[in-house]
Amino acid sequence: MGLADRTRKRINRRLIPFLFLLYIVAFLDRINVGFAGLEMTRELEFSNEVFGFGAGIFFVGYVLLEIPGTLLVELWSARKWIARILISWGLVAALTGLIHNARQFYWARFLLGVAEAGFFPGVIVYLTHWYRNQDRGKAIGMFMAAIPISQMLGAPISGALMKIHWLGYSGWRWLLILEGLPAVILGVVTLFYLTDRPEQARWLRDDERAWIVGELEREKQAKQKGPNLSAWRSFFQRDVLLLTLAYFFGATAQYGFGIWLPKIIQRLSGFNSVEVSVIAAIPFLVSFPAMLFVGWNSDRTGERRWHAACAYLATAAGLAGSLLTGNNVTLGIAMFSIAAMGINGRLPAFWALPPALLAGTSAAACIGAINCVGNLGGFVGPYVLGFLSTHSGGSYASGVLFLSVIAAAAAILVVLVRRPAVC
């Protein structure tokens, strides 16, 4: 085996499984409110609008530390910053199970967003410290495959936990409490397991360490031959603005769909909470191989924009198609599966674009900015769908159509991004 292949495989084995596990826990704590809502809204007498606002306000808190967080990963320590995030969000996530009214719900979700801010873009920046541009799409795909896996695992686990009624607390409370604790444990483990940069990696052989350090340095020098923009000026580049708006639309569709899917299925089928939790896993199960394929094929071809755009179009088509299935649960789930394949499949190709456009602190800051502003869509999607549902007699059709339209708009925006020279 050649030096390059041996080094890449050793880095993959060391980093990807652990980061994958962290993102599973992160995404479970982010979306489990959708399953808790099957019982929470009834017990606490929340309207769909109240629940949608509370679910979405997570992302208002989330944006506050995004850009500082990515800069800390670039300039300070990924290991320490990610550990801090894990411990604080685990504690807040567990405390969310103790709320009793709408105001407490809003504050708990807001603070959870503040606690988790910086995790995802921080990891994306962290991967640029270890992977060349030509390997980055696959690495991001393997890391972000945790999204469909967490959605697949979250459904049956959440269904099982909602059966627990210890100490007089309802099942949805135990769901939130117990799913928050693993983040605290993994935060402590992170401090001892992750290595900030290849230069510090004692688990690499000397020749492997020298190879990856040299490759990344050559790539960095090649990018710096272009215009040298400050982090602030790079925010306002045309392509960064297009990517930010595209990600905003994508996050609106992703979280509007993901958080409301259990309740949409419950209304469509009339099944109980446990049955709904199992069925809700199906779209994300089929999206898993799609996500890996997009990451692999975009690396193989060197093309990013059309991979991401086609995935956005699949999202739009699946959501629009679900409106034509009537009360047919099987066809509805098939359309939701197409939408999920697009929602999750877009991510590896999309997140390989910003590091290819910029380098160093500019790249780190712009990744944080794209994720920061873009994830405000995580507030808009759940809230708008809840608002439209409340004001249309409980129907989700207008909200689903809204998500379909903005997914199609995101596809157009990605195609308008200039093709990076190194992609």
Image (cartoon, helix red, strand yellow):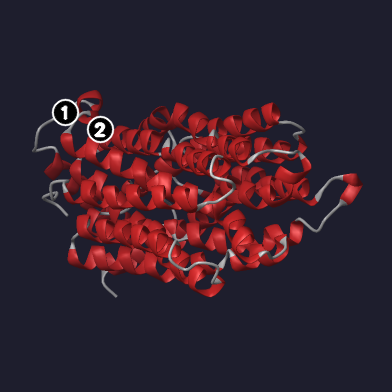
Q: Amino acid at mark 1?
A: Leu
Tag 2–tag 1 contact (CB < 8 Å): yes
What is the spatial separation of the Cα atoms under label 2 and label 1, in whole angstroms? 7 Å
- Check disc 2 and report the residue beneath it: 362
Extreme-front residue of the structure: 393
Residue in front for this viewpoint, 353 or 162 = 162
Q: Is residue 285 visible?
A: no
* Residue 97: quadrant of the picture: top right
Q: Residue furthest right?
A: 167
Task: Determine the residue positioned at 91% across, 46% down.
Answer: 167
Q: Nearer the viewer, residue 164 or 249?
A: 249
**Left or right: where does residue 226 sit relative to residue 385?**
left
Q: Which residue is mark 1?
A: 229
Q: Is residue 379 above or below residue 201?
A: above
Q: Residue at x 74, y 39 (%)?
A: 45
- Say what secondary structure mark 2 lies in: helix
Q: What amino acid type is highlighted by mark number 2?
A: Ser
Percent across and percent down for residue 263 are 61, 54
Q: Is residue 414 left or right of residue 188?
A: left
Judged left or right of residue 113, residue 247 is left
Q: Quadrant of residue 312?
A: bottom left
- Kindly tell me whether residue 98 is visible in this rendering: yes
Please tell me which residue lies in front, 391 or 342. 391
Residue 221 image point, x, y percent:
15, 42
Q: Is residue 350 left or right of residue 63?
A: left
Image spot of residue 339 (x, y percent): 41, 62
Q: Residue at x 61, y 42 (%)?
A: 48
